[in-house]
Image (cartoon, grey):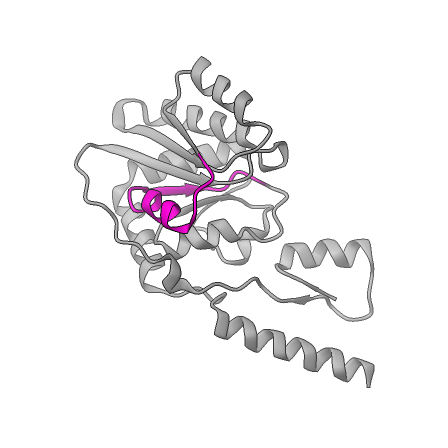
Amino acid sequence: MSAVSAIAAAHIEKAAPVSAPVLVLSNGITPADWKVEPEPRTDGIVRLASVMRIAPRKRVIPLLRMLQSAQRMVASGARLELTIIGDGPERARAERFARRNDLAVRFVGRLDRAGILEVFGRTDIYVQPSIKESFGLAALEARCAGLPLVIHSESGTTQFVTDGVEGLVGADDWAMAGAIAQLAYDRELRGRISQHNRTHEPAESWPNVLREVIHGYEVASSARG
């Protein structure tokens, strides 16, 4: 048996105990497909982005509450703006929530890769609010684009995000709001993480993943032996 992250593998082992550990075979990516040059800006706005299906499981309303809390934390230190890429049944409710609470949020609907990269080019922080995420491919794409990530500690996205290296990891929504505020306020930290993400390819690049897949087949073949 295999799973795309250590967290997903642990859930499988708990639900269906097996004699051998569940192999972790990550999703793969071509990092060069997601390289983008950041647009120079001097407006002082800190821009956030998230790519998701706007459905309850992806936690769009908690994301908006995180934005609200983070804006209060930074107060006049920075203006936060969020772009949500994607569509789904919760979009109308999320738009109403943003309007009622006077949040700076753009809902741009579904975009192709070129459109996503255009948004990423003017984005400072990527936020993944979901918890029940076995891997988080959109977050990996953002990481390859050089964006610092903010994620939940129970998400499978921890497979490729180490706290303080590729982004910041929060144990709950309040901690994630604090991480957003910290990155918004601390330009040096934000720049250091962004530089790391731009200059270090993730382990989930296709050559590495294919080697792990071949190893997985070798393990499976020997187990059948």
Q: Is the C terminus in the top left, top right, bottom left or bottom right quadrant?
A: bottom right
> Is residue 70 rendered magenta in the image?
no
The answer to whether residue 191 is above or below residue 5 is: above
Instruction: Decide if residue 166 is in sight here.
Output: no
Task: Say which residue appears at 32% left-offset and 36% top-offset.
Answer: 47
The answer to whether residue 81 is above or below residue 158 is: above
Residue 159 in the image, given as x and y percentages of width and height? 55, 57
Residue 30 in the image, given as x and y percentages of width and height? 44, 65
Residue 165 in the image, given as x and y percentages of width and height? 40, 55
Q: Which portion, as a residue range, is magenta?
A: 109-130
Task: Say which residue appears at 82% left-offset and 65% top-offset.
Answer: 18
The answer to whether residue 105 is above or below residue 10 is: above
Task: Say which residue appears at 41% left-offset and 51% top-offset.
Answer: 113
Rendering quarter of residue 21: bottom right
Q: Residue furthest bottom?
A: 225
Residue 43 in the image, given as x and y percentages of width and height? 19, 32
Q: Nearer the viewer, residue 158 or 127?
A: 127
